[in-house]
Image (cartoon, grey):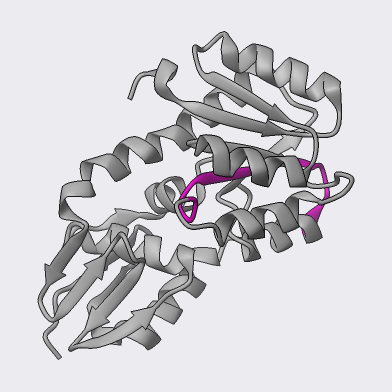
Amino acid sequence: MKNSEVKILLVDDEPDILEIVGYNLKNEGYQIFKAKNGMEAVKFAKKISPHLIILDIMMPEMDGIEACEKIRHTKGLENVLITFFTARGEDYSQVAGYNVGADDYITKPIKPKLLVSKIKALLRRIKIAKTTEQNAKVKIGNIIIDREEYVVIKNGKKLTLPRKEFELFSLLASKPGKVFKRDDILDNVWGSEVVVGGRTIDVHIRKLREKIGDNNFKTVKGVGYKFIINEN
């Protein structure tokens, strides 16, 4: 996808932030749309179907957390990339953001070069997703992964996984037997610069073991994890 085809919705109640961020991203060739609060963001998102939404958290009328939740429950926008602007130390807001489906964070004050790098990293996920569109349903052993519906079916039983669990499982299962390094997992599932706890991957793997099968996942000590086809 060319930069000129990418639509980015910027949402912030501070005109200076919209101006600075919009200027830097326009220079990269992206289509930029702007909204000054959460309510406008939801309306714009429905109208233009952006590829990426950058949301401030603290805004009048409707904050970023509520706006993110509404967008995630809007048909056709379930999988749009969403990243938050967040001030340093807003740990609670970060946790709340992930709970409503945020993909990543950009920390204020914003550094233009870091901003552009971050956006490029996020948009690479769209390119990866497009390569799998023709294989939206993948069968591996007794497991079916439906990337469109975000569900996993094992032995005919449907398993609905939280977003990050699904993305982690989908990544590992994309190449059975391949060892995915921890850094690669963080980059592909959480974003290369997002701050998460050191045991975040371990916790998600533990949950996947419980739901899909302990024997389907192998820990490679000091390296990462791999998915193993197991018919049981």
The percent position of residue 201, horizontal first and vertical second, equals: 48, 65
From this view, report whether residue 214 is shown above or below residue 21.
below
From this view, report whether residue 170 is shown above or below residue 13.
below
How many callouts does the rendering have? 0
The percent position of residue 224, horizontal first and vertical second, equals: 35, 60
**Residue at 84% in and 22% down:** 15
**Residue at 59% in and 46% down:** 104
- The image quarter in which residue 169 lies: bottom left
Magenta stretch: includes residue 45: no
- The image quarter in which residue 140 lies: bottom left
**Residue at 39% in and 34% down:** 124
- In the drawing, does residue 37 fall left or right of residue 215? right
From this view, report whether residue 172 is shown above or below residue 129.
below
**Residue at 38% in and 62% down:** 168
- In the drawing, does residue 107 fall left or right of residue 191? right
Of the 4 image quadrants, the one containing the C terminus is: bottom left
> Relative to the observer, which residue lies in front, 172 or 144?
144
Magenta stretch: includes residue 84: yes
Of the 4 image quadrants, the one containing the N terminus is: top left
The percent position of residue 229, horizontal first and vertical second, equals: 14, 75
- The image quarter in which residue 137 lies: bottom left
From this view, report whether residue 36 is shown above or below residue 57.
above
The percent position of residue 69, horizontal first and vertical second, equals: 65, 60
Q: Which residues are magenta?
A: 77-91
- In the drawing, does residue 230 fall left or right of residue 53? left
